[in-house]
Amino acid sequence: MTTQNTRKETVLERLHKKSISAKDIANQFWCEKQMELNYVSQATPTAAMNRGSAIHAQLQVQVYKPLSVEPVSWPDRMYKQAYENILSLNTLAQERMAREIKIYGSINGYTVAGQIDEIRMADGKAVIVETKTTTSSKFTPEYTRPHGVQIMLYRKMLQELVDGSYGYRNLDALYRMQSMRLSEGFAAGLREIGVKEELMTVGAVYTRMFAAMASLPQLSDALVLHYVNRKSGEDAGDITVDYDREKLGKDITYALGYWNGEREASPVAESDRWKCNICRFYGKQCTVWYQGA
Ligand code: SF4
C-alpha cells in the first residue's frame, strides 16, 4: 500500500515566494485579491507603476551611492545589497538623510522584507519617510490606509533591527550566507575599489550591515507619508502618521489569516467597488463585482 503525501501547499509556495514583502501586507488593505493576482496572473507592470519606479529612481540617486562593481551571481547580488545598505546608512550620519534602505524582519515565523524610501534626522531622532506617487490630490482614509500599514510595519521592523531582536543569525538561517562564495570577477572588482580583505565575504558584509542598523539613533514615532504627483513629479503633500502598535498588531493578525491559509484572498467590500474601476484585473481575472460588458 502506498501512502500519499497530502500536505497542502502553503500560500507562499503557491505564490512562489520565500518571504512576504511589507508592500504585500500593505496592499492587502487595498484589495487582497488584487495583491494575490499580481503574483498569480504574471501581469507585467502598468504604465503607472513604471512612472512611479522612475520617480523613485530619481529620488534615489540624489543621495544614494550605488556600488560600481556589477554582480554576476546570486551571492554577488546579496553582497551588493548589504554593501549599498551600509553606504546608505553612512549618509544618515554624514548628510542627515539616507535613501533606499533594505530591511528584514520576522512576523509569526514569516520572513518579511521591505525597502524604506528614506530615513531623515529630525530633533535627534530618525524619521521614516515613505514616498508614494499619486494622481490624486484628495488623501482619503481609504486611499492612505495601505500606506499607513506599510510605514508602521517599517517602523516595527526597523526597531527590531535596532534592538537586535532580528539580526544576522535570523537571515543566515534563511540564506546560509557563511557558505556563499563571491564570483572571481566581482571579488576582483571589490578589491579594485579598495574594499578591505576582512569585508570580502557575504557573511562579513551582512555582519557589518546589521551592526550599522543596530547603531541607528532613536526612531521617531512620527512617520511621514510623502506624496509626489505621478505626472509632474512635484510634491503633492505630506501626511504624518502616528505609530500605533496596537492598531498595527490587529492589522498584522488580520493579514496573517491570508498567509496562514485560513481564508481565501478577499475582494474589496461592496462599498469599495470603486476600486475595481481602476483595477487591471476587473472583468478579466476578477469578476467578483463585474456586471458584464
Ligand atoms: S476587480 Fe476589484 S475585487 Fe477584483 S481584484 Fe480588482 S479591485 Fe479587487
Image (spheres, grey):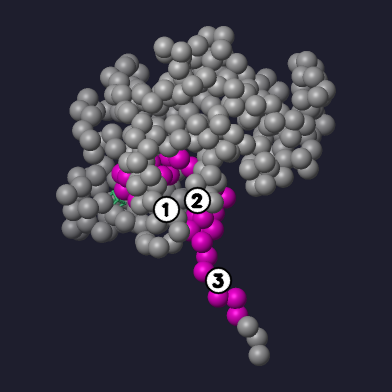
Location of residue 148 in the rendering, given as x and y in whole percent from the top left corner? 33, 34
The x and y percentages for residue 249 are 38, 44
Q: Residue at x 42, y 13 (%)?
A: 122
Quarter of the image with the N terminus in it: bottom right
Residue 98 horizontal side relative to residue 261, left or right: right
Of residue 89 and residue 115, the one placed in the foreground of this image is 89
x 77%, y 25%: residue? 199
Q: Amino acid at mark 2?
A: Asn
Q: Quadrant of the C terminus?
A: bottom left
In the image, residue 65 lies at what x, y percent?
A: 59, 17
Disc with the residue nearer the chain's start (2 vs 1)? 2
> Would you name the residue on which mark 3 appears?
7
Earlier sequence position, callout 3 versus callout 1: 3
Residue type, mark 3 in image: Arg
Q: Measured from the top left, where is residue 94 in percent x and y? A: 57, 9
Q: Which residue is mark 1?
A: 256
Q: CA distance from mark 2 to mark 1?
A: 8 Å
SS class of the residue under badge 1?
Answer: helix
| Spatial CA span between label 3 and label 1 | 20 Å
- Is the distance from the Cβ of mark 1 to the nearest ligand 1 atom less than 8 Å? no
Residues at marks 3 and 1 touching, judged by CB atoms closer than 8 Å:
no
Q: Which mark is residue 108?
A: 2
- Work out whether mark 3 precedes mark 2 in sequence or the reverse, and give the earlier one: 3
Task: Magenta stretch: give its range.
Answer: 4-32
Q: Amino acid at mark 1?
A: Leu
Can residue 271 be seen in the rendering of this structure? yes
Residue count near mark 2 (Cα–Cα under 10 Å), binned few <14, some 14–19, many ≥20: few
Find out whether the residues at labels 2 and 1 contact each other: C-beta distance under 8 Å.
yes
Tag 3: Cα neighbours inside 10 Å, few (<14), some, or many (≥20)?
few
